Amino acid sequence: MLIPGLTLALKKIDYDYHAINLRDTESEKDFAANNPAKKVPILKINDLTLTESMAIIEYLDEVFPEPPLLPKDPAQKAHARAIAFHITSNIQPLQNLAIGKMLDEKIPGYGLEWCQFHIKKGFDALEKLLGLYSGTFCVGNQITIADIVLPSIVYNAMEKYSVDMTPYPKIAEINKKLAEIPEFQTAEPARQPDAPKDQKNWGENLGFK
């Protein structure tokens, strides 16, 4: 899921998409000049360069406040941030493909086991959080920053690591609702110009066309 692209789509802001081949030496040099961490995403607005998904989301929400991606109620706002940070800080980094490959080099097959373990551990907590705070979406009935970061981790869990979603009905239910929203569909990696032809899109994986 292209998180900056999704945020821009929800805000009805046009943007240009540029793919980066991290395996190409020259591209990598240019990429590092924009983000020393050599990580995506990067958002460029005129002379401004922004990195890190959560920082990009919050910047766009402050500069382009409609529709808001954080609830007005301070407690609900804190819950939305907590769920978003749980996904991006407690789950996503631990299921990174680079970590899995490194572990596989040490102990063959352990990379998959590691990623599955940490996704399930993170999902156990996430399911409980959603049980406390969700409505139609992750926090109440408004799309928030938590919903923006949810589909990517669910996609990875299902497609990359074959995690059974049966123990996580609330996560699966909200993810399926998000898959019906046009802005979420257009931000899928499989729908981008550089996507491999055999890459399944997120909606098709959930039964949508």
Image (tube, rainbow, N blue to C red):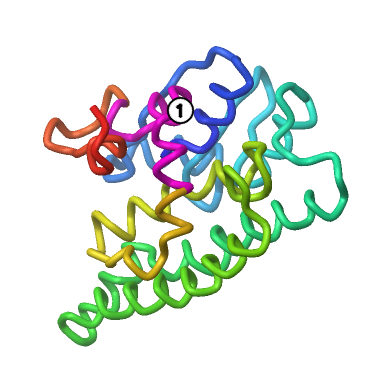
Above/below status of 45 relative to 201? above
Q: Which secondary structure type mostly characterizes the magenta part of the structure?
A: helix
- In the image, taking residue 68 as reference, residue 152 lies left or right, namely left
Q: Is residue 177 magenta?
A: yes
- In the image, taking residue 83 as reference, residue 116 lies left or right, namely left
Provide residue 23's location: percent of width, then percent of height: 27, 45
Q: Quadrant of the N terminus?
A: top left
Tag 1: Cα neighbours inside 10 Å, few (<14), some, or many (≥20)? Answer: few
- The amino acid type found where label 1 is placed reads Ile
User: Residue lying furthest bottom in this view?
Assistant: 107
Residue that mark 1 sits on: 181
Provide residue 173's location: percent of width, then percent of height: 43, 50
Q: Quadrant of residue 154?
A: bottom left
- In the image, taking residue 112 as reference, residue 63 lies left or right, namely right
Provide residue 117's location: percent of width, then percent of height: 36, 79
Q: Quadrant of the C terminus?
A: top left
Task: Write down the region rendered in magenta.
Answer: 174-191
